[in-house]
Image (cartoon, rainbow, N blue to C red):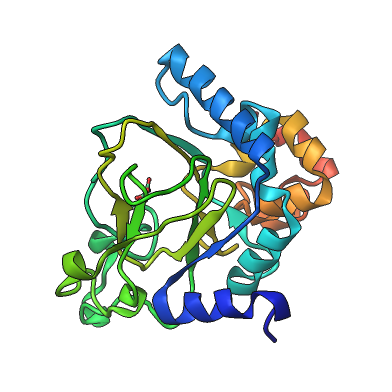
Amino acid sequence: MIIPDLSLQIQAMQENGFTVLNNIFTIEECNEAKHQLDHLAKTQEQGCLECLFNKASIFERIYQVPTLLKFIRYFLGQDALLSAAHGSILPPGSGAGGLHTDGNITGHNRSQSMALADQHQRITSHVLALNIIFCISEFTQTNGATCLVPGSHLHPTLEEPPEAQEKASIVEAAPGSVILFNVNTWHGSSKNTSNQTRYALLTPWRRFWTRCEYEMARIVKPEVLARAGAEGREIFGIAAQSPYLPVAQWDRTAGEPTAEWIHLKRS
Ligand SMILES: O=C(O)CCC(=O)C(=O)O
């Protein structure tokens, strides 16, 4: 079944490995996100732009927009997990980080984890993870916007496809849009040759049964999780956590020891 009003975007995901959804954030939300990113960056603390959902309420919006959630779940299943949430600030002169795929540290594109029996073929039959970039600034030809290589999600091996550099195209998008792509798709920021800083939020998602980039269920602040309600318990993967006790002593739904063994709960 296709989501009727998103059929073109679904087709683009299948054919090109990426698409754009407009109007996911309002201009006011973009302004607030930009303000909070600048505020966090000013601290210059290590990791200040990581795990954003814990740092300002605007960043909780990344998993609260129904159309976006519907789209994510179309590809990754109802129990899809948020895997990380970073801020990106690209000042003039920066960017052009190089084309790459995601999932090459903790995901299925990790070269060290390829088995001999795989015969150099990576998994392209299903979407195993998505990356979603929130365009907080307008994304233009000159301000470091993301470039993507159409069709490269189907490239069978971990090596960059031939002519990827020539085929890569910069995606222009209005502020408040999101760029969604299969983690198999080659992509990267382009060079910011404008005189404006580019702001974005990078929010990868994964299947329930794969490992996220962070232990999200342990990192999310209790009050953030409480505000997200039942939906949040799914998104942060409370039930996805592996038991650290025998399964008879483990409550999978709660992601912790059963009441009888709760004294063994790790802090
Ligand atoms: O900032 C961008 O445009 C690209 C981000 C990126 O390469 C990534 O999240 O893997």
Total count of labels: 0
Q: Residue at x 43, y 26 (%)?
A: 47
Q: From this viewpoint, is residue 45 visible?
A: yes
Q: Position of residue 259 (x, y in %)?
A: 84, 42
Q: Position of residue 184 (x, y in %)?
A: 36, 68
Q: Is residue 219 above or below residue 255?
A: above
Side of 147 relative to 96 (left or right): right
Side of 54 relative to 233 (left or right): left
Q: Position of residue 224 (x, y in %)?
A: 73, 33
- Between 47 and 19, the one nearer to me in the picture: 19
Q: From this viewpoint, is residue 237 visible?
A: no
Q: Is residue 135 above or below residue 93?
A: below
Side of 184 relative to 216 (left or right): left
Q: Residue at x 77, y 48 (%)?
A: 254
Name the image quarter holding residue 263. Answer: top right
Q: Residue at x 18, y 64 (%)?
A: 165
Q: Residue at x 83, y 45 (%)?
A: 229
Name the image quarter holding residue 169. Answer: bottom left
- Between 234 and 179, the one nearer to me in the picture: 179
Quarter of the image that includes the C terminus: top right
